[in-house]
Image (cartoon, rainbow, N blue to C red):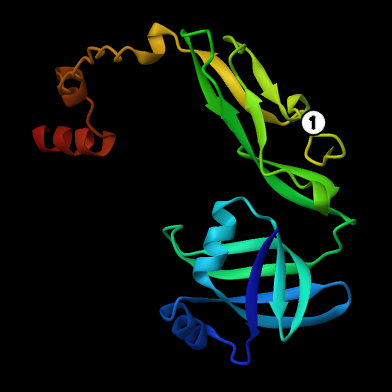
Amino acid sequence: MAKIKADQRAERGSRPARRLRDKGLIPGIVYGHGAENMPVTLSEHDVELALLHGERVLELAVGGKTQNVLVKDVQYDTFGQQILHVDLTRVDLDERVELQVPIVLRGTPADEEAVLQQTADVVTVECAVRSIPDEIEVRVNELRGGDVLEMKDLPLPDGVKLIDDPEETVATMTYVSEAEVAPAEEEEVEAPEPEVIGREEAEEAPEGAEAEDQAEKE
């Protein structure tokens, strides 16, 4: 469990938060377990290092006291590079929590004629805080064309319960036909023939005009 030091934060708002980030600090909030919400400031380097190593539960030292917290949410900038804010919820190590865990596909399918496409990269599970897995690893070496990997097929560790729909698709093996990859042939499009006003249309004059012309002749 990573140990991180934090300081209570008095200022709120976008401008103070921007000043903190300029100093290499991250604004955050600690909540849960019936206690008051506590705005805090954390080291950006410490948080990034913990997340890089897959840490989900942290030992947070604030105001001379230590408490266990779960990284509930991390907000990034538009480019997904800089951490803007961190949500931390207080937890007991023996309680069960619901959270999302990354799904990692490993290996190379033996069927070279099919394309492997991953449609879900996280799975929602429930487990004890002490037993939170870093990731759910799935070997795909045996997958062949037409196979579908679903949530219920994920090899969850003991004590980890699936929360997502068991029928939700995680990955598919699809054959790509020649018709789908070959460039579409250009279809010959006949140019529309020019509209010609024939004698019949010329002869079809309004009745009023015909009567007026006949009157002049008489």
Work out which quarter of the rendered image holds the N terminus and state it: bottom right
Element at label 1: loop
Q: Residue at x 50, y 88 (%)?
A: 16
Farthest residue in the left direction?
A: 217
Q: Which residue is mark 1?
A: 166
Residue 122: x and y, percent?
Answer: 65, 41
Above or below — where is 164 with respect to 112? below
Above or below — where is 81 with respect to 135? below
Residue 84: x and y, percent?
Answer: 52, 70
Above or below — where is 161 with respect to 29? above
Residue 36: x and y, percent?
Answer: 81, 83
Residue 200: x and y, percent?
Answer: 20, 18
Q: Is residue 149 left or right of residue 203?
A: right
Residue 32: name its quadrant.
Answer: bottom right
Q: Amino acid at mark 1?
A: Pro
Q: Residue at x 51, y 70 (%)?
A: 44
Q: Residue at x 70, y 76 (%)?
A: 61
Work out which quarter of the rendered image holds the C terminus and state it: top left
Above or below — where is 72 with respect to 177? below
Q: Which of the pair 46/181 is nearer the observer?
A: 46
Q: Which of the pair 42/74 is nearer the observer?
A: 42
Residue 150: name its quadrant.
Answer: top right
Q: Which of the pair 35/12 is nearer the observer?
A: 35
Q: How many marks?
A: 1
Q: Residue at x 53, y 61 (%)?
A: 48
Farthest residue in the bottom direction?
A: 10
